[in-house]
Image (cartoon, grey):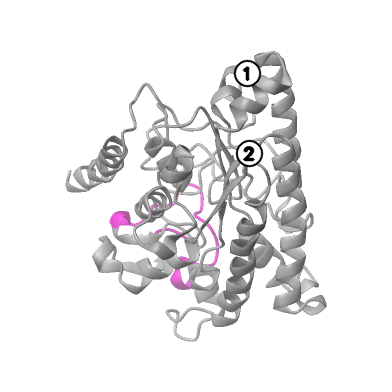
Amino acid sequence: MARACRRWGVVAAVVVLAASAGAAVAAPQVPCYFVFGDSLVDNGNNNDIVSLARANYPPYGIDFAGGPTGRFSNGLTTVDVISKLLGFDDFIPPFAGASSDQLLTGVNFASAAAGIREETGQQLGARISFSGQVQNYQSAVQQLVSILGDEDTAAAHLSQCIFTVGMGSNDYLNNYFMPAFYNTGSQYTPEQYADDLIGRYTQLLRAMYSNGARKVALVGVGQVGCSPNELAQQSANGVTCVERINSAIRMFNQKLSGLVDQFNTLPGAHFTYINIYGIFEDILRSPGSHGLKVTNQGCCGVGRNNGQVTCLPFQTPCANRHEYVFWDAFHPTEAANVLVGQRAYAARLPSDVHPVDLRTLARL
């Protein structure tokens, strides 16, 4: 019963923050919200494709009202938290199987194991790369033009929507730092690899901009070198983060933040950067102040740090998951996702965002 009370306390905190920001249940702050990303925010797009990167089985969703849905968490993802803070009644649905009416209020294109590079994650089977997600968005835009009647009306509608794009984690985790399957680690220095990723990212963001995306939040890559998986494999004591991985990711994030400034020179563009790396660094540095205790182990999993694999089907997870940063070998718990989602929406520190948080972006 105590755990149930804490669970509802987390949800209540999200609702209270939304209400304090003036988010009325019947009037979202923006007309629609579109999500691009990987397993951190996938909510079911991988469920019906031939992939090992799936989470539509217990214990995933153990704390989610709908049970296992394809979310790689025990409960809410960051975009679930953000959608509620923006005032949406329902969570943003996956693009797979979305209705025409749902396209009007936004869909989630994210796919587990997806990357900026086409080959990223291929050892896990099928996935929808960032370019594939952008193609699906372009298809959705054409449907919106048909629904709304003409391109100008659709463009006006889309210009007020929020877009969050969180790509790049797998390009490091399931590509650059996986020499058994990929040779990018020997082909590129970390600086060259970051440049390659940013070049590809830029082209796809331009395609999104050409198709109406104006209020766009680029979500940085988190501290992959601190995940239970990397701690299990490469940390001598299972606690100290893997610096060579985090150092490479910081290079990418710095360039991604700079990309925001470039896009904000385009007519009508309002791009911003969400510093997930910094937010997680703050949480890991002082977990107790955020109500968390366990930072280096998954709540469920196998092996050292519970970091060898994701949750096994029907595995019994830890009981005190509200105290864990990580749910499995790679993905945060709902408790951590709530903290990140809240700070993306309403920055706690100036370093959380550049230049504005999502609450401010919605008003522009």
Q: Give amino acid for label 2.
A: Phe
> Where is residue 42 shown, x and y percent of the image?
57, 44
Which mark, residue 109?
Answer: 2
- Category of crowding for the residue at label 2, using alpha-carbon neighbours closer than 10 angstroms: few (below 14), some (14–19), many (at least 20): many
Q: Which of marks 1 and 2 is nearer the N terminus?
A: 1
Q: Which mark is residue 304?
A: none
Query: How far from the left and from the top, in percent, is residue 179?
Result: 74, 74
**Residue 147 picture quarter:** top right
Whether residue 105 sits left or right of residue 237 in the image: it is: right
- Residue at horizontal 51 percent and vertical 82 percent from the top: 235
> In which quarter of the view is residue 198 placed?
bottom right
Q: Main secondary structure of the magenta part?
A: loop
> Looking at the image, is 67 positioned above or below residue 294?
above
* Amino acid at dot 1: Ser
The residue drawn where x is 51% and y is 69% is 223
Check if residue 149 falls in the magenta segment.
no
Considering every residue shown, the one lying at the far left of the view is: 2
The residue lying toward the viewer, choosing from 312 and 7, is: 7
Q: What stretch is highlighted in magenta?
A: 298-322
Residue 320 in magenta stretch: yes
List the residue tagged with mark 1. 100
